Image (cartoon, grey):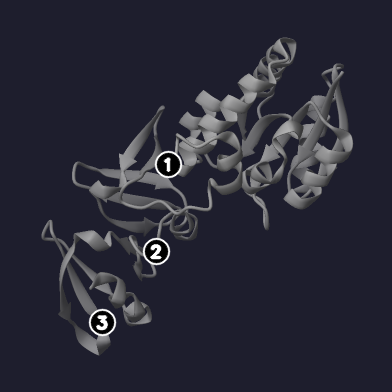
Amino acid sequence: MIRTLIVDDEPLARRGLELRLAEHPDIQIVGQCGDGASAMKAVSEFAPDLMFLDVQMPGLDGFATLRAIPVPQLPLTVFCTAYDHYAIRAFEASAVDYLLKPVEDSRLHQALFRVREELDKRDSGRHCEQLLRLLGDLSGKPSLTLEEALQGAGERKLGPGDRLSIRDGHRTVRVDLATVRWVDAAGDYMCIHTDAETFVLRATMRELESRLDPRCFPRVHRSTLVNARRVVSLRPHLNGEQFLALDCGHEIKLSRSYRDRLELLK
């Protein structure tokens, strides 16, 4: 039996996965958790072989939860997410598998096939290396040991020396953040304007802002982030607003609500 833990803050998502897993006789669900803190306790108490881990959760998200679990206790992990911009290339290369919500039966079957293969090998060292590659890819520090990555990866914000994974159709593009000029919002999408082209990322301003170093990519308008290194001059406008001139010749408005960001642009 594959002792399995389900971690998701949405009760319906947990129930849906539970029903799908019931069709697999070798899966034994030993616990369900709605947050990262409970998941840590459940891993210690039940010692699951497999954990379905939601990426987006309040408090401790999936990555923070993973970092908080002691390395010897780490179960095989299948990530679950409603958004395909969460470093899918890294998931494909480094995790046992990942599932996009709503979970499709065919993808669940495929994920469980991979899990069974991993359990047959019983190679925990290999799985630790896979997790290290994943966390190193996300943190921009691929040379870290697993313990260092689990302690610190993900807390570091991305800056001009890093790259951002962007899902572009059927491929994932690694965008060098030094080439980014500015970012603006368009509904549920973000337009990332680089020296070469404009990429469209399905994400909210809050999600993207949480991943970027605010000293390098300050928010200058409710719908705009700018690469501070690309700003060459400021021009006063009406009512305390400013126009920021970029090295490419484009101008961006800095609204009064974000005047405190001027210090980052000097």
Mark 1 lies on residue = 140
Name the kind of residue labelled 3 in the image: Glu
Name the kind of residue labelled 1 in the image: Gly
Residue drawn at x 67%, y 56% as measured from the top left: 58
- Which is nearer the eye, 223 or 79? 79
Q: In the rendering, which numbered label is found on residue 109?
A: none
Residue drawn at x 31%, y 50% as measured from the top left: 192
Q: Between disc 2 and disc 1, whose residue precedes?
A: 1
The quadrant in which residue 52 appears is top right
Q: Are marks 2 and 3 in contact (CB under 8 Å)?
A: no
Position in image of residue 242 (x %, y %): 22, 78
Mark 3 lies on residue = 241
- Report, in whole angstroms, how far the alpha carbon at label 3 lies from the one at label 1: 35 Å
Q: Secondary structure at mark 1?
A: loop
Mark 2 lies on residue = 214
Q: As displayed, is residue 32 above or below residue 26?
A: below
Q: Name the front one of labels 3 and 1.
A: 1
Query: Is 253 placed left or right of 209 in the picture?
Result: left
Name the kind of residue labelled 2 in the image: Pro
Q: Residue furthest left?
A: 249
Position in image of residue 48 (x %, y %): 82, 30
Q: Residue furthest bottom?
A: 239
- Report, in whole angstroms, how far the alpha carbon at label 2 lies from the one at label 3: 20 Å
- Which is nearer the eye, 191 or 50? 50
Query: Is 119 placed left or right of 172 in the picture?
Result: right
Characterize the local packing of mark 1: few (<14), some (14-19) or many (20 or more) Cα atoms within 10 angstroms.
some
Task: Answer yes or no: is residue 85 visible.
Answer: no
The quadrant in which residue 21 appears is top right
Residue drawn at x 83%, y 46% as measured from the top left: 41
Characterize the local packing of mark 2: few (<14), some (14-19) or many (20 or more) Cα atoms within 10 angstroms.
some
